[in-house]
Image (spheres, coloured by chain):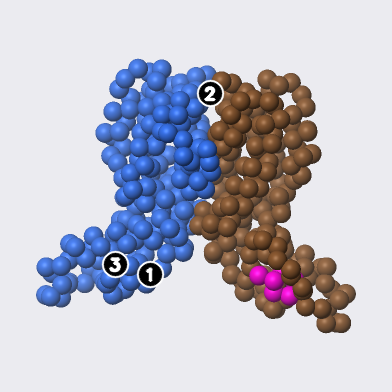
Chain colours: A blue, B brown
């Protein structure tokens, strides 16, 4: 996923007016396909068909399937803003705030598509797995844990990641009842203390 | 995946001697391919090539890719025996025993292949997802939790499942350090109390 010197082909005159819409249509179709089938299972041809464009346009706008994936999977929140918002408030309810934020992300349809695409792709594609490690664990969870000033922030961040990812798996991907249909606040009450312990308590 | 009345074609005379080995070779190749690529990503042709047999033999022995999957993903332990072994011992260390058993399963190479195949397939294939729900959550975790006599066994079982599946995801699939390389007893000490709380404490 290194950014090499891409030089997109200059769009033909008739394309220009439609360009931003076309690009957005491709991104939306890519998110939907990656969410459903993962990176390996989503072909650029299927994405082009779903977006109603010629497959060549995907290359025109994004250069490659991998670059399209990175663009489509843009983290659906600003980690800095989230960290500040979640850290603020009583320290002994930090775990609950983290779980509530995480569930709210997954409950929103477009964000859920992005997260589904990330997780499903990361299962079989090493680049997507590296992206989840870098973006979710190192980019979002670790800075949040580190800001509390606790010891062993990296161990704690991976423990938090394990519970949150597993929760997403059971609730949103495998849809195992009764956890899949439980109200958000029930899940927050059950899982919040786990996250609280992983972040704040002696390990 | 219902077992309909399959009637395997009678093997040709020259096949008979080699039959058990061929069947085992196909199963081993299937486990390896499902583990690496998941159900959707593993073609019967690739499995046949890896097993060194003609693809028609897979149909001969297993009938379909789905039946091959079920045969290859046979649960790598006996849930009844495990339940008895894990339940025995001090009740306040039950969570630790569950985590230790789960990690020991994943550390063993052939079992890890089966579990990887299950989890990777369940991400995009609804039948495989149903199999994980039925075999792992309802067949293994729920009876164990229920045997302790606690309230809300189904909620507790899905919470246990969420932490264990997330642990496997971070440690064995995404390989996020430092959790990926931590000694088993370190992970047991960190995650055991979470499972203990999900099984035994008021929710």
Viewer can see residue B98: yes
Q: Is residue B2 above or below residue B182?
A: below
- Residue picked out by circle 3: A51
Q: How much space separates mark 2 and mark 1, taking CA atoms?
A: 45 Å
Q: Which residue is at the far front?
A: B5
Give the left or right position of residue B115, taking residue B61 as reference. left
Mark 2 vs mark 3: same chain?
no
Q: Which mark is residue A88?
A: none
- Subunit that carries the residue with mark 1: A
* Residue B141 placement: quadrant: top right
Q: Residue at x 42, y 50 (%)?
A: A116
Instruction: Decide: few, some or many residues near mark 1? Use Cα within 10 Å; few <14, some 14-19, many ≥20.
Output: some
* Residue A39 placement: quadrant: bottom left
Give the left or right position of residue A102, taking residue B67 as reference. left
Q: Which mark is residue B203?
A: 2
Mark 2 vs mark 1: same chain?
no
Q: How much space separates mark 2 and mark 3, taking CA atoms?
A: 46 Å
Taking depth in this image into account, of B165 and A60 the one nearest to the observer is B165
Q: Secondary structure at mark 3?
A: helix
Q: Residue at x 68, y 41 (%)?
A: B140
User: In the image, which residues are magenta?
Assistant: B59-64
């Amino acid at each position: 996923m290194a950014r090499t010197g891409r030089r997109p082909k200059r769009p033909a005159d008739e394309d220009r007016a439609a360009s931003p819409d076309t690009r957005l249509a491709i991104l939306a179709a890519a998110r939907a396909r990656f969410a459903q089938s993962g990176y390996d299972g989503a072909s650029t041809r299927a994405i082009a068909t779903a977006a109603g464009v010629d497959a060549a346009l995907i290359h025109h706008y994004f250069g490659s399937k991998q670059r399209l994936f990175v663009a489509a999977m843009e983290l659906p929140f600003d980690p800095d803003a989230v960290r500040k918002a979640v850290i603020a408030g009583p320290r002994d309810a930090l775990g609950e705030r983290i779980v509530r934020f995480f569930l709210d992300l997954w409950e929103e349809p477009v964000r859920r598509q992005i997260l589904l695409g990330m997780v499903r792709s990361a299962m079989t594609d090493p680049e997507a797995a590296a992206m989840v490690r870098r973006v979710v664990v190192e980019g979002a969870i670790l800075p949040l844990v580190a800001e509390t000033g606790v010891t062993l922030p990296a161990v704690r961040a991976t423990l938090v990641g394990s519970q949150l990812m597993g929760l997403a798996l059971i609730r949103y991907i495998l849809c195992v009842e009764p956890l899949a249909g439980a109200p958000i606040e029930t899940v927050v009450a059950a899982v919040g203390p786990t996250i609280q312990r992983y972040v704040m308590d002696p390990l």
